[in-house]
Amino acid sequence: MSKPLIVIPTYNEHENIGNIIPRLLALPLEVSVLVVDDSSPDGTGDTVLSFKDTGRVHLLSRPEKKGLGQAYVAGFSWALERPEFDPIVQMDADFSHDPDSVLDLVKELAEHDFVIGSRYVSGVNVVNWPLHRLMLSWLANKYSKFITGLPVEDATGGFKAFRRSALEKLDLSTIRSDGYSFQIEVTYKLYKAKCSVTEVPIVFIDRHSGTSKMSRSIVWEAAWMVWHIRFPWLF
């Protein structure tokens, strides 16, 4: 492993991204950060560019809002075009994923191809979510595990670390899902490609500021997409 890269998708995360980048740059891993921004009208991109002089912060600006899944596809593609980056970490901008936990995930890559920062591998470690959202997330993971057979407790989690060699096994051009289902699809495809996976317990804390991008359509997409992921020949 050489230069860790953290990929963060954003849309209207001006305040959060301005606070989380310094936390990540202070990690002893000497990480680089790639922010994939969908032309946020709140100036998120300009905030990212204010860190350009560090030489470790990069901005990939997309012309319109195209969803979380395609933001990660764009970010992963950018990373794989630059062989100096390994491993590659994905996380949210809103501090629901603790920047310090990046160290725990990357450490496990010594023994595994990819690692999930898991909310449910050691009980339920979620703070400040309303009960209905917590139950939806927990049940979604039970449902996806039952359909796909994945040996993980948090297939919908968005805090992951990958060896470069693992991501290179994905055909990113075939990924069309978004939100929860994007996380499930990537985990499932890597698992079927014989990549070893483990889960590291994390404490997930609801966002510091801004508004959630979760919608009813994303939930419904995940509900039917797991069948497509597991039985693609039926669709």
Image (cartoon, rainbow, N blue to C red):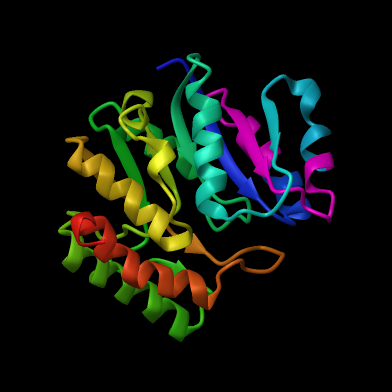
Horizontal side, residue 73 vs residue 149: left or right: right
Residue 56: give x, y in percent of width and height: 67, 23
Which one is nearer the viewer's eye here, 146 or 210?
146
Which one is nearer the viewer's eye here, 126 or 219?
219
Q: Does the magenta segment cover residue 44?
A: yes
User: Could you say which quadrant of the image residue 6 lies in?
Assistant: top right
Question: Is 43 placed above or below 108 here?
Answer: below
Question: Is 7 placed above or below 69 here?
Answer: above
Q: Which residue is found at the position 39% from the left and 72% from the top?
A: 137
Q: Does the magenta segment cover residue 89?
A: no
Q: Which residue is found at the position 35% from the left and 27% from the top?
A: 168
Residue 64: give x, y in percent of width and height: 71, 51
Image: magenta residue range: 21-46
Seen as rendered, the residue at the extreme bottom is: 132
- The image shows a total of numbered marks equal to 0
Residue 206: give x, y in percent of width and height: 56, 67
Q: Which residue is found at the position 83% from the left and 55% from the top?
A: 41
Q: Which quadrant is home to the C terminus?
A: bottom left
Which one is nearer the viewer's eye here, 35 or 19?
35
Is residue 201 visible from the viewing direction of this image? no
Is residue 84 visible from the viewing direction of this image? yes
User: Could you say which quadrant of the image residue 156 lies in?
Assistant: bottom left
Question: Is 77 placed above or below 93 here?
Answer: above
Q: Which residue is found at the position 53% from the left and 17% from the top?
A: 82
Q: Which quadrant is home to the N terminus?
A: top left
Question: Is 27 placed above or below 36 here?
Answer: above
Horizontal side, residue 32 vs residue 113: left or right: right
Horizontal side, residue 223 vs residue 143: left or right: right
Horizontal side, residue 195 vs residue 158: left or right: left
